[in-house]
Amino acid sequence: MVFFSENFIKEVQSKADIVDIVSEYVSLRRRGENYVALCPFHSEKTPSFTVSPRKQLFYCFGCGTGGNVFNFIMKKENLSFPEAVRFLAEKIGLEIRENEESLSDSFKLKREIYNINKMAAEFFHENLSRKEGERAREYLQLRGISLKTAEEFFLGYALPSWDSLFNYLTKKDISPELIVKSGLIIPGRQKGSYYDRFRDRIIFPIKDVYGHFVGFGGRVIGQGEPKYLNSPDTPVFTKGTLLYGIDKITREDEKGIILVEGYMDVISLFQSGINRAVASLGTSLTEAQAKLLRRYTEEVVIAYDMDAAGRNATLRGLEILREEGLNIRILTLPEGKDPDEFLQKYGKEAFENQLHNAKNFIEYLLDQQREKLDLNKSVDKLKFIKKAVQILSQIEDEIERNFYIDRLYRQYEIPKNTLLKALHKKRIEDIPEIGFKYKNSQFRNNNKELREQSPNKALVNGIFRTEREVLKALINYPESGKKAAYKLSPIYFLYKNHKKIFSAILELVKKGEVITEDKVLLALSKDEVAASDFTKLLMEGEFIKKEEHIEELVLKIKQNYLKFAMKQIKEKIKKAETIGEYNTAINLLNYYQKLRKEMELLKEESAEKGGM
């Protein structure tokens, strides 16, 4: 995507009034100085979506989504930031000042490859309907794929010829060098010779979220290796960042996304009326793919093949998806079938029944361990208990953890006290590097991250307020804020979103830029949750602290951090002593003393400045 100048972005933002833009999507009603509406991003009966014309921001107090006019268009139209700028510029009739000289070489190359891929997709698709494509059509028919579905996915056929696509594209005045960069042809041994990468294969065009043809997958007809062949990495195609079928997913579907392995699984599900499946392109799920899924859903059902490779891929995928805070279920189809095979044999209704009974990730992990062992043998039962403890230690919610402890007791007669004692020991084993450690991937609400671990609500609420006061001070007083930012570090912010917001501010300071609301929002444009929380912070009301109090806030935030860290360590010491882990307790005590010394130094500094 093209990058626009900061002045052009400001001009677009100043002319694209957020009330005018948002009112094209929802019915806004005036309430005081703001406007309210039913949120366009989640289902609700009482309006919690607020638009501020003075601040040119929106925020939903129901689902927590917020930002400026660019964030709204990015989320509503599923666009990147540059695309949202262009979208709004065109909407308000602002001339987009770009020319070939202003475009980067990388942008021009990507644009040319998109065009080449589009022509190749059309060529392959046309081949499928010709006489030469009869064998490919018969194969699709054998696999139960209708012509209508083939058209919907723009399926194609690569001819057996070694150079049919090469000849087609060069006749369109495309240089061989460019076609090589697109990954569609390969240089031959002789200088100046080339041959097609895909030959005698069913072609599955791969699109990105914007509908661009970015690459291709090819399935051999009949015998041959490899069975599936993908485009190589190119300037527009990286397997680990894409999901096949993502261009057909909408955010309106609240049932979650089904993650499968292959092209045919996605297509078969779509043809049966289940149009919420994507495939990971034959690779192990990556962090980038998990982030892409998170943009569209809160729940993912993993429906990989249940052979050894599929089971391993499922286990790897579980951890990556959990790190993104997604709810996960695992579908294990009978007879080891993949979704395509199961649908062909049993139909949609049977598949949906299986889908309804998909296991959550704890159930799946426990079942996986149980299947490997004979629990009638003492040795195997002991192994299972140890594995179960490792699995249950991942659950932060005490009620949920106790539910599974009770279940293990009922199913396998494992004493509850045995599990509880082992879990206590497991959960205090790791001494944190500094302060404390908590798992934030399990929580959506930042307040909950700390409340789950501290019964002292006053302490938690005090930390939350102080962190927000500091962030507001940095925004309201840019010059003083710049000095204060250098005295802080992201580690001092205990709330995940506050940490991200401060990191964005610190980056601006390091670059020598003035701290502004718009610049921080732009820096957070790829993190929807943090951007929304920053918007909420801006809409909470005016900041009343005086500029000279910034130093006081800096000291306070450091003290809050150490207070909470020391509290966490004291609790761990008590637990360690309770179960007889005295070496662990001593190590923790030494660490506690170091933190206390840091706190004393801070108090001395505070006293020198006149106290707090």
Image (tube, rainbow, N blue to C red):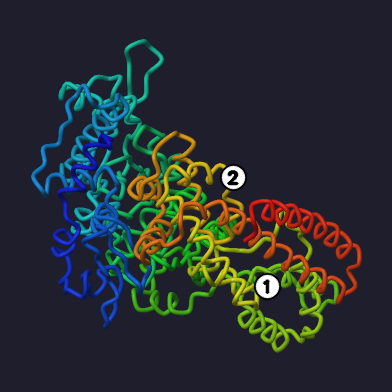
| Residue 291 numbered mark, or none | none
Q: Earlier in the sequence, mark 2 or mark 1?
A: 1
Where, quadrant-wise, is the C terminus in this rendering?
Answer: bottom right
- Visible residue check, residue 327: no
- Residue 392 - label: 1
Q: Is residue 506 above or below residue 387?
A: above
Disc 2: which residue? 487
Which amino acid type is shown beneath numbered disc 1? Leu
Left or right, residue 316 beside residue 121: right
Secondary structure state at the residue bearing disc 1: helix
Q: Residues within 10 Å of mark 2 (few under 14, many from 20)?
A: few
Residue 158 appears in the rendering: yes
Dot 1: within a 10 Å radius of its alpha carbon, few (fewer than 14), some, or many (20 or more) residues?
A: many
222 in relation to 76, above or below: above
| Residue sitting at the far bottom | 410
Q: Which image quadrant for residue 343?
A: bottom left
Most foreground residue, 404 or 118: 404
Placement of the N terminus among the 4 image quadrants: top left
- Decide which of 500, 380 is in the foreground and name it: 500
